[in-house]
Every structure is written in C-alpha cells, then in structure tokens.
Amino acid sequence: MQRYFIDQNADVNQRFCITDQGDIHHISNVMRHQVDDYIIITFADHYVYKCKLVNIGAEGIMVSLEERIDVDTELPQNVTICSGLIKSDKYEWMLQKSTELGASEFIAVGMKRSVVKITENKIAKKLERWQKIIKEAAEQSYRLAIPTIQYQATLNDVLKSTKTYDYILIAYEDAAKSGEVSQFKSLVQQFKPNDKVLIIFGPEGGLDEDEVSLLQDVGYQIGLGPRILRAETAPLYVLSALSFEKDLHN
C-alpha cells in the first residue's frame, strides 16, 4: 500500500486533505485510486494510519483515518550527513540511499576539492529537486519523517552550528590509509538514543589539508575500514554500520 506524508498531527476525529500536487497526481493518475480505496499516511507527530479516500479533487484529496499502524523505522540517533558537492547523479543517488538507511538531515557543502560548483541563482532549484528525491525515498522506505537538506557555501558556515551536535565525526581518507579502525567503532558504541550526530565527508578529491586543520578541534577523525570508499559510498557505509550496531543490537 502506497505511503504519503501530511505535515499535520494526526487526529482520529477529523478528516485531512492532501494538497501536495505531486501526491495528488500520484494518487489520481499514477496509482489511479478511487474513492473508498486505502492509502497509508504518516503524520508530523510520527503516527501512521491506514486512511480511506473520501473525495478526490484536482486541488485536494480528502481522507479519513481508519486504523492506526504501530511502526518505528527511525534510527535511534539523529544523523546529519554533511558532504562535499559531487557530481549530480552520484549525489542524488547518495541522498536517496542515505534516506533509506535512516539519515535525518543533509548538508551539501562547497568544499575546496569539489568539482561541482553551484551558483547562487541555482541553489533554490537544486534544493527543491533534492528535497523531492528525499521525500520519495522516505515514502518508499516507510520512514516516519522526511529528512531535510540545506546548502552551505563553505565548511566555515557549517562550523557555526557544531555546538548543537553531541558528536562530530570526520571521515578522513588518511585515517583509513593509516589503519585507524577502532575510533569509529568505539564512538558508535557510545551513542545514546536521540543523540545528534554530524558526520562530515569530503567530495571526490577528499578533504583539503586546510579543511582538515579547520576540523581538527571540533570532532573525531575516523577511518572506514581498509578500503578507500567513493564519496557517494562512504555515507552509506557509516549509516549501515550505525544501523547494525544500534538497530539490530538493541
């Protein structure tokens, strides 16, 4: 059964209207649903309900809440993936898969070795496209929340908010090359439920030496095993390891 999000809290005593034009098109024209068909809706308070379609219109689709579904698909930690800009198709693939694996937020950063550059007039359009990819991945993977994404021009801009995180991890290629493997495992084991974790990844060319120096005093450098991972693969490795440790062992 197809899932959709509504940015309101659930209330069994009222009906809700789906107004997102993308969702309306999908329900009406792609799935070809009719009145009295059922869909699944995830609400802003993370409650999930099986809902009946009451009315289908071009400007909105009215639904009634029929049955609550108990489900918890979120990682115990709130993980922010901060990564240097990489080629468009690879970055979008990373966003999709990282959403499926439980990331809570994304920060796209223009780093020194980023081949891709975004001009000021294209930022809003890029963010809109990326958010759409994230939303669709969240629906597909039965997430209870849609991750957010923001753009920062430099790492200096990211560092302005580092005090809001409980842990900051820097995935550094040289740490992997030198055989560092224990730090990441040790840190993950320390994570508590609801901890906010920022994980920083470089672009295709890795972090620049100046960027590494900039990050030296704000977090922990971690290696991700003996193999050097691509920029779009490294976040998936981290999220998979975190899920294995925290989802499956708790």
Image (cartoon, rainbow, N blue to C red):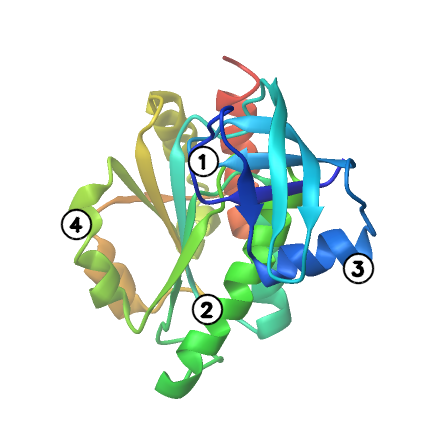
Lateral position of residue 50 relative to residue 173, left or right: right
Closer mark to the observer between disc 3 and disc 2: 3
Q: Mark 1 sits on what residue?
A: 181
Q: Is residue 134 left or right of residue 40?
A: left
Q: Secondary structure at mark 3?
A: helix
Three-letter amino acid code at disc 1? Val
Q: Are marks 1 and 4 in contact (CB under 8 Å)?
A: no
Which of the labelled discs sits on residue 113, or is there none?
Answer: none
Q: Is residue 136 above or below residue 79?
A: below
Instruction: Tell me the element at label 4.
Output: loop
Asked if residue 114 can be seen in this view, the reply is: no
Q: Quadrant of residue 168?
A: top left
| Sequence-wise first label, 1 or 4 | 1
Please indicate, yes or no, whether residue 186 appears anywhere in the rendered image: yes
For the point 60% across and 55% down, the residue is 60
Q: Nearer the viewer, residue 208 or 43?
A: 43
The amino acid sitting under disc 2 is Leu
Residue that mark 2 sits on: 127
Tags 2 and 1 in contact by the CB under 8 Å rule? no
Q: Position of residue 111 (x, y in %)?
A: 36, 72
Q: Are marks 4 and 3 in contact (CB under 8 Å)?
A: no
Q: Residue 162 location, x and y as percent?
A: 20, 49
Q: According to the image, label 4 marks what residue?
A: 217
